[in-house]
Amino acid sequence: MADHRGAPGAPHGARVQTRGVVFVHSCPRALAAHVEWALADVLGQPVSLDWAAQPVTPGTVRAEVSWTGAAGTAARVVSTLHGWGRLRFEVTEEATAGTEGERYSVTPSLGVYRAVIGVHGDIQVPEERLRGAIARAALSGSLLEDEVAVLLGAPWDAELEPFRYAGEGAAVRWLHQVVS
């Protein structure tokens, strides 16, 4: 989890600022206003998204919003939205001098995937997760390649790719979180 307390050497109480994007790939129309209210609660300001029909799943809509705010905001967004069970979304948070970047992918069938993202945008897989993948492959007889694919989020990418493609060309709105 990203550390939102501040970078080393930062004044006490100072929060590390970062930015990110929330991509709502698929949301039932009836939940759209609730998603906006939930995002407003996390981001600390009103949110009004430009919803567009999601052609992959009739009756759903999609939108995206870019934000700036305290490190850890992505985790708070995911914690707020993932329990609804009918949303497909991704949240990214850029790395800072004092925090790692993060990418979350959420689908109704797979749940939450979290990856640590390095400053160059690549997924960072911790040593213990790699050791776990090796052990699972050895115990279950599965291919190590399949275990590593899960560590890299391949099942989430496969499920979300049609929804991402349908969202190309969507408007992006920037929100700036007010931090006191």
Image (spheres, rainbow, N blue to C red):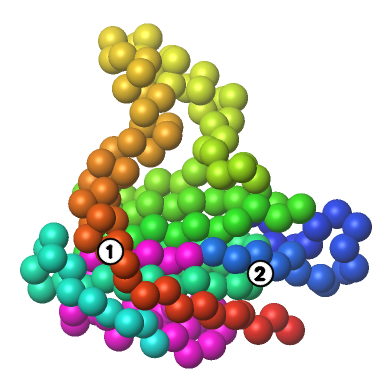
Give, as a three-letter code, the residue at label 1: Gly
Reading the image, the residue beneath label 1 is: 167
For label 2, the residue is 70
Q: Residue at x 45, y 78 (%)?
A: 173
Query: In screen coordinates, is 23 left or right of 67?
Result: left
Q: Residue at x 91, y 57 (%)?
A: 9
**Residue 131 in view in this figure:** yes
Q: Which residues are magenta?
A: 21-47
Q: Is residue 45 magenta?
A: yes
Q: Position of residue 90 (x, y in %)?
A: 39, 58
What secondary structure is marked by label 1? Answer: loop
Residue 88 percent location from the top left of the image: 28, 60
Q: Residue extending furthest front?
A: 169
Give whichever of discs 1 and 2 has the lower sequence position: 2
77 sits left or right of 53 in the view:
right
Kind of residue at badge 2: Ala
4 and 65: which is toward the camera:
65
**Which quadrant is home to the C terminus?**
bottom right
Residue for point 44% across, 15% down: 134
Closer mark to the observer between disc 1 and disc 2: 1
Percent x, y for residue 66?
A: 49, 71
Query: Gap in Å between the C-alphas at discs 1 and 2?
Result: 27 Å
- Above or below, 45 against 21 in this view is below
Tell me residue 105's x, y (percent). 38, 52
- Is residue 175 on the magenta stretch? no
